[in-house]
Amino acid sequence: MRLRCAAFHRPLLLAGGMLAATAAPGASQDVVTLRVEENFRREPNGVVLARLGEGASLRLLGTEGNWTQVEVEGWVWLRSLQSSDDPAFDLLVSQVDGENLRSGPSGTILGVLEEGTLLEELGRDPAWARVARVGWIWSASLTSPAPAESEALPSRLVTSAAADPPTGPAARSPGNFSRTGRGGAILTAPDGDTLGVLGPMGDVEVLAREGSWARVRLEGWMWMPETASETVTEETAGSESVEVLDPDALMSNPTRYAGRVVAWTIQFISLERAEAVRTDFFEGETFLLARFGGADGPFVYVAVPTDRRSEVDGLVPLERLAVTGRVRTGASQLTGAPIIDLIDIQRSREDE
């Protein structure tokens, strides 16, 4: 099986430095939750072991400055693991592009483990291993009972609750401005990567709303000395797609767009289950065989999570669908067709 989630190494806007430990790691049973997709590291600001998805639950162990030590548990496909030579661990991820960490055998994807990540084995199913690993997460990306916002965020971005009430323009913001209360992450899109973290009581201008999401504008200042080396291009900035990511673009550079979110119109052909030879899927995984755009378009695959199988059981061959998905690979090893992981699916009214 191959890579399933977004690119691993995007930086956070607020990169916290190492500070003295605020609590020694221990056996706490407190559970914290990721509120944004985030890197899971071997040590604070260290090697990335995995990329964990929004909503993942983690056991809180301790804190060190702007970082929180946690333990993550889940299930990994046995074919992507091998025995570890390190006496402190039982297994390591051997799949070249990394492997999914799931809530159970064939369950919901919690994140993606990097190749070479060492794991403790907790149990085993015929084709799956239950594993655990201790690592570190940027504290501002965690919900309570992680360290309070005043500890987790750089102090210059924190507004103390005991401070005097604000005065001036910020206290009389017009109707299209909103005060964020506890603050939060700012993403490139509802399904995008984290651009940065806004401190408590920050003011943002609301430009548009889509359900519970708001598109916002933030004004402020950052340290940026003028040097010849600071020219930013799309490649160096890791810009979130300005291209139209059709299958041809994905197939031309299969790894570049892994993790990007695309919205496609496809013509459904059949509902399939992956055989062992399809190494970009796990064996038995459900996927849609379809054509991009219509009958004359290139073939594409849409992987369907186990808990969403009911949404695709009634599809009719040749009907048109609007799908949103995250790019798993731009070119599958067996056929060269792109694979996306299903996020949303809408049936055409004409076909209903």
Image (cartoon, rainbow, N blue to C red):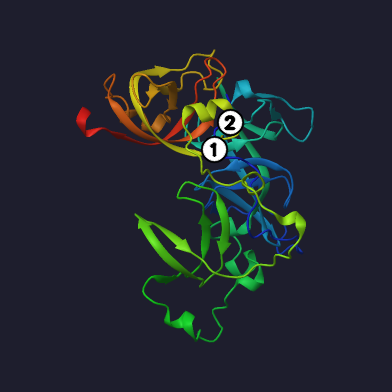
Q: Is residue 106 visible?
A: no
User: Image quadrant of residue 254?
Assistant: top right
**Left or right: 300 in relation to 114:** left
Q: Amino acid at mark 2?
A: Leu
- On screen, 217 above or below 78? below
The residue positioned 32% from the left and 27% from the top of the image is 312
**Left or right: 299 in relation to 162:** left
Q: Which residue is mark 2?
A: 3
Q: Amino acid at mark 1?
A: Gly
| Foreground of the two, 304 or 300 | 300
The residue positioned 70% from the left and 29% from the top of the image is 92
Mark 1 in CB contact with mark 2 (< 8 angstroms): yes
In the rendered image, which quarter contains the N terminus?
Answer: top right
In the rendered image, which quarter contains the C terminus?
Answer: top left
Q: Position of residue 12 (x, y in %)?
A: 63, 54
User: Image quadrant of residue 83?
Assistant: top right
Q: Position of residue 294 (x, y in %)?
A: 34, 23
Q: Position of residue 131 (x, y in %)?
A: 62, 34
Q: Position of residue 206 (x, y in %)?
A: 41, 65
Q: Which residue is mark 1?
A: 259
| Foreground of the two, 347 or 20 | 347
| Foreground of the two, 315 or 206 | 206
Label 1 vs 2, first from the N-terminus: 2
Q: Residues within 10 Å of mark 1 (few under 14, many from 20)?
A: many
Q: Which is more foreground, mark 1 or mark 2?
A: 1
What SS does tag 2 mark? loop
Q: Is residue 15 visible?
A: yes
Q: Residues within 10 Å of mark 2 (few under 14, many from 20)?
A: many
- On screen, 165 above or below 337? below
